[in-house]
Amino acid sequence: MNSAIQMHDVVAPLDDVATQHFETGQPLRLRRGQIGTVVMTYDGSAFEVEFAGRDGRAYALLPVPAGKLIVLHESPMAAAA
C-alpha cells in the first residue's frame, strides 16, 4: 500500500502507458512524466488517474498501480537543520 499518494494529488506515470482516448476511443500513448490527477483510490494499491489538457478536458482515465506513479510537488519541503 502506498500511503504517500492521496486523492487529488498531481502524479505522473514512471513508464509510457498505452491507452485509449477517453471520448473517441482512439489509441494514445501516455508518456513517462505525463501529468495527471488522482480521482479515485483502490485500497492504495492502484489509483484511477485522469489525464487532461490545458483546457481541462479529459483525454484519458485509467487505473495505474501505485508503484508505477510518482507524486509531483510544486514547492519544496522545509528541511531539518
Image: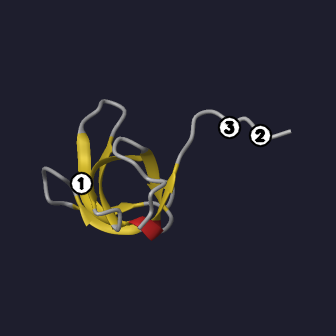
- Nearer the viewer's eye, disc 3 or disc 1? 3
Determine whether the residue tagged by mark 1 lies in a helix, strand or loop.
Answer: strand
- Please determine whether, in this image, residue 52 is positioned above or below residue 62: above
| Separation of residues labelled 1 and 2 (CA atoms) | 35 Å
Which residue is at 53% across, 46% downward?
A: 72
Q: Which residue is mark 3?
A: 77
- Nearer the viewer's eye, disc 1 or disc 2? 2
Query: Which residue type carries mark 2?
Result: Ala
| Label 3 Cα neighbours within 10 Å, binned few <14 / some 14-19 / many ≥20 | few
Whether tag 3 and tag 2 are in contact, CB under 8 A, the answer is yes
Looking at the image, residue 40 sits to the left or right of residue 29; the answer is left
| Separation of residues labelled 3 and 1 (CA atoms) | 30 Å
Query: Which circle marks residue 61 in the picture?
Result: 1
x and y, in percent, of residue 14 in the image = 51, 65
Q: Which residue is mark 2?
A: 79
Query: Which residue type carries mark 3?
Result: Met
Looking at the image, residue 8 sits to the left or right of residue 14; the answer is left
Q: Name the residue furthest top.
A: 55
x and y, in percent, of residue 7 in the image = 34, 45
**Residue 44 occupies quadrant:** bottom left
**Camera-side residue of 14 and 21:** 14
Residue 48 visible in the snapshot: yes
Determine whether the residue tagged by mark 2 lies in a helix, strand or loop.
Answer: loop
**Camera-side residue of 68 and 7:** 7
Which residue is at 63% across, 33% downward?
A: 75
x and y, in percent, of residue 49 in the image = 31, 53
- Please determine whether, in this image, residue 58 is positioned above or below residue 66: above
On-image quarter of the C terminus: top right
Which residue is at 31% across, 30% downward?
A: 55
On-image quarter of the N terminus: bottom left
**Camera-side residue of 47 and 35:** 47
Determine whether the residue tagged by mark 3 lies in a helix, strand or loop.
Answer: loop
